Amino acid sequence: DVLRDPVEAVQTILSICRGLLARGSLCEAHRRQAPFLARCAACTRIYGTTRMDRAKMETLDQLEAAAKTLNSSPFFALIMPEVSVNIVMALEGAKEEADVAAFPGRIVRVKNRAQAIMPPEFGASHHMAQMLLTAMRSNPLVRAAINVKHDQGIEAALAGMGLEVGRTVRNDKTAASDDQVVQSLAELANNGPIPPVVIDLGSRGIEPMTYIFGKDAKSVAETAVELSNRYARL
């Protein structure tokens, strides 16, 4: 953001700071420096007082915990796609991208570990947010999703996990777009609730992908890590 637009950079920094204050992420360090503030909760009251704010904070906290789960896995990097990974989680009843939180810049591979570039925030994803919103319209119990790569090893690893797997279908095998992938998922949803795992075989310009859906960020991260563990043993 600094290179693209200094104003956007300031907005990004402000958003991060407000999120930290709202979630009380800085409170412990502040109290160590000023023990007389042990009972202070001013920042969380000011920046996170409404029910919606609390729901957003809980969603962001879950995403941060999920990212740590991926980072702690020695094998998750094995199933990261070339386009990198994102975990998205939506507010209950989400209707638009602004109701979906994700990691700006995605989660990338750093020294064979999954590493989030920035803290999660709402409205930070288009494609994965649209995939999740589409799945939620089919299955209201779904509130989170993650993408990992697809190959024959993934197929073999999935076979032993007992998860229902769906597959998107596109008649046009030429160049496609992310929006066409979303449309393919919507067409799959016409046949019933979206299953926990959906495979898109890609096309020209679109990397084959495996999408994992679940009730929250924790569950999809844990499923992805289990998948990577099985993949590593092949």
Image (cartoon, grey):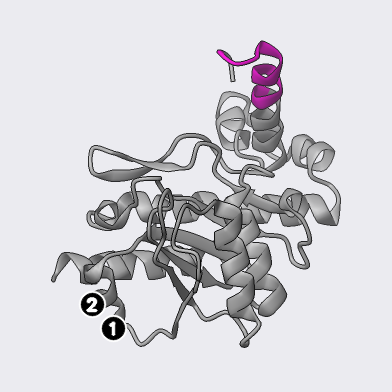
**Magenta-span inclusion, residue 18:** no
Q: Which residue is mark 2?
A: 156
Identify the amino acid type marked 1.
Answer: Ala
**SS for callout 2:** helix
Q: Residues within 10 Å of mark 1 (few under 14, many from 20)?
A: few
Where in the figure is residue 203, as x and y percent of width and height?
A: 41, 58
Q: Image quadrant for the C terminus? A: bottom left
Say whether marks 2 and 1 touch (CB < 8 Å): yes
Look at the magenta stretch and give its main secondary structure: helix
Asked if residue 51 lies left or right of residue 116, the reply is: right
What's the residue at 63%, 42% (across, down)? 124
| Residue extent of the magenta highlight | 3-13
Residue position marked by numbered label 1 in the rendering? 159
Which element type, helix, strand or loop, lies under badge 1? helix
Q: Residue furthest left?
A: 234
- Closest to the observer, 41 or 125: 125
Name the residue located 54 percent from the left edge and 72 percent from the top edge: 214
Label 2 to label 1: alpha-carbon separation: 5 Å
Residue kind at label 2, given as amino acid type: Ala
